[in-house]
Image: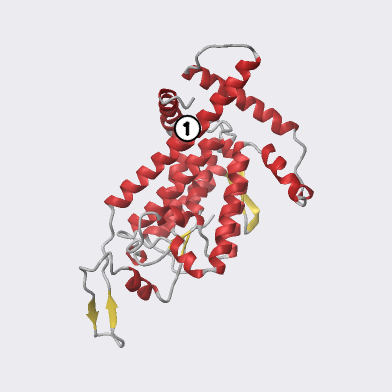
Amino acid sequence: MIRVTIRCRNRLQYFTRHSRRFYAHETPTYDDTAGNPMIDYKPRIRYLRPTLWTFAVAGTFYLGFAAYDVYNDVRKLKTRRRRSFVEAPITWEDVQAGKSTSMIRDVFSRQARDPITLEDFRHPSTLPALWNQFLGPEKLMYGAIALNTSLYGLSQLFPRFALSLMHVPAVSRNYTLLTSTFGHASLLHLGLNMYGLYNFAFPVAASKSFQGSGAHLGAFYLSSGVFAALAYHVTAGWPARHLRLTPGLGASGAILALVGAFAMEYPQAKIGIIFLPFLSLPAQELLAAFAAFEAYGLFVGIRSIRFAHAAHLAGMAIGAGYVYLDGRNRLWNPARKVAFQQMQATGII
């Protein structure tokens, strides 16, 4: 569950190559007092556009996933009504009631399903049927793991592709706030993050805040990742000014949002530390300790550790705050209702 900053020896060259169209009006200052001439760039960090872009993208995620969720709920409800020979207009209350019924059926279907083994993946012809057995949160989790792994493979084959994923606060365009959440700097980095995603995604999806909704989990996961990247971007202005030209990469902002939500939903659940297998702590205690560590790293600094502390801290705060402030009823259900009304008005459902 790590988002890292990448220490590049050619950060100055990277900035020089990519910044001309952004900061053509800015001129470097030269300091000849040191042993070697040093170019001291003071790039300006933009705040308004990245912030507006982040809110717009998060809103798009929530409305898009909500529309997808409502569309599937209405389709299932129509199927059940045809079997029962019921003909009546579908209302918002019907959709909400049908959602609860679908959730109960999904829980029982997962319990009755045969365990999935490695043998199931050895025959390509069985993969579509296997995929259809997965519930929404499982499809999201395995899909995210596959996407992150594929992008890491591509970045190893094509290093220039890896550069397009990274977010450099003083240089990058806004879209890298999203793409950076799918990139990873090393195989260990990828493995730790995917291990965290695998362990926390489904328990959070099964909690009362998400109620087994893969669409809700997807909107939350992607939005949390973008907001965590925005936190990294903003703090490059202060207090972490040394990160203005440092690329950030990793999915841990989104994953730590899952950890934050998990700690609020299951405060007494024990969480082990991967490098300290003999130690496990209650979820909320571990969350508080990790938050203190990240806050120290952000405001004081830990030279030997190259974590994106702001992204980690923001992810945990987003996850914990989302559950505490009842994001399901304050954000998700209103987004579903808006999507239902708009699709009904346009005749989509």
* Quadrant housing the N terminus: bottom right
* Element class at badge 1: helix
The residue tagged 1 is 67
Q: Which quadrant holds residue 35?
A: bottom left
Residue at the extreme bottom of the image, as rendered = 35
The vertical placement of 276 against 346, above or below, is: below
Closer to the camera, 231 or 183?
Answer: 183
Residue at the extreme right of the image, as rendered = 119
Closer to the camera, 160 or 40?
Answer: 160
**Image side of residue 110 versus residue 143, left or right:** right
The percent position of residue 144, horizontal first and vertical second, equals: 57, 49
The answer to whether residue 268 of the structure is visible from this angle is: no
Residue drawn where x is 63% and y is 11% of the image: 85
Closer to the camera, 118 or 202?
Answer: 118
Q: Which quadrant holds residue 208?
A: top right
Q: Give amino acid for label 1.
A: Ala
**Image side of residue 320 versus residue 147, left or right:** left
The answer to whether residue 302 of the structure is visible from this angle is: yes
The percent position of residue 186, horizontal first and vertical second, equals: 56, 65
The percent position of residue 183, horizontal first and vertical second, equals: 51, 59
The vertical placement of 160 against 192, above or below, is: below
